[in-house]
Image (spheres, grey):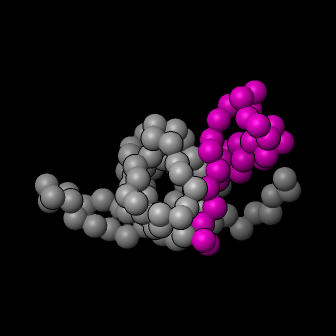
Amino acid sequence: MDFSSRFSRLGIEKRDLIEGDTRHFITPDNCAALTANETYLTMGKDGEICETKEGHFRHKYILDRTSAVQQWTLIKLSPDIDLQRHLNRVKKNSNKDGCLSQKKRHL
């Protein structure tokens, strides 16, 4: 299944190529369904660069059993408030320090 969703800034691409843009995820049919136009935190393998029919180059991300996917929502709307607070902290620290930061963070 080829799936498109929105991306927040975490990963291998430059900020101007990621924030607010659409990315394509490829998942096996037996993976949990993702909802179009929702926001997700995804952690997994780096994307592969593929050429579109129009000749543009885009990243495609393969989500498999080694990937972690969590729907991103407001804390007050989250079914797991503590988890969403931790995810917000991870995003804040990653945006500030980068995902490869050597600083230790306590959640």
Left or right: 73 as drawn, with respect to 105: left
Residue 85 in view, yes or no:
no
Between 101 and 80, which is closer to the camera in this rendering? 80
Q: For the point 84% across and 53% down, which residue is it?
A: 107
Q: For the point 81% across and 37% down, which residue is it?
A: 81
- Point out the residue furthest to the top here: 76
Left or right: 42 as drawn, with respect to 78: left
Q: Which residues are magenta?
A: 65-94
Q: In the rendered picture of this protein, how many numbered marks are placed on residues?
A: 0
- Point out the residue furthest to the front here: 30
Q: For the point 44% across and 46% down, which residue is it?
A: 5
Is-magenta flag for residue 98? Answer: no
- Point out the residue furthest to the left here: 54
**Residue 44 falls in which quadrant of the image?**
bottom right
Residue 65 in view, yes or no:
yes
Q: Quadrant of the N terminus?
A: bottom left
Between 47 and 27, which is closer to the camera in this rendering? 27
Q: Position of residue 37 (x, y in %)?
A: 46, 37
Q: Position of residue 55 (x, y in %)?
A: 14, 59
Q: For the point 54% across and 70% down, which residue is it?
A: 64
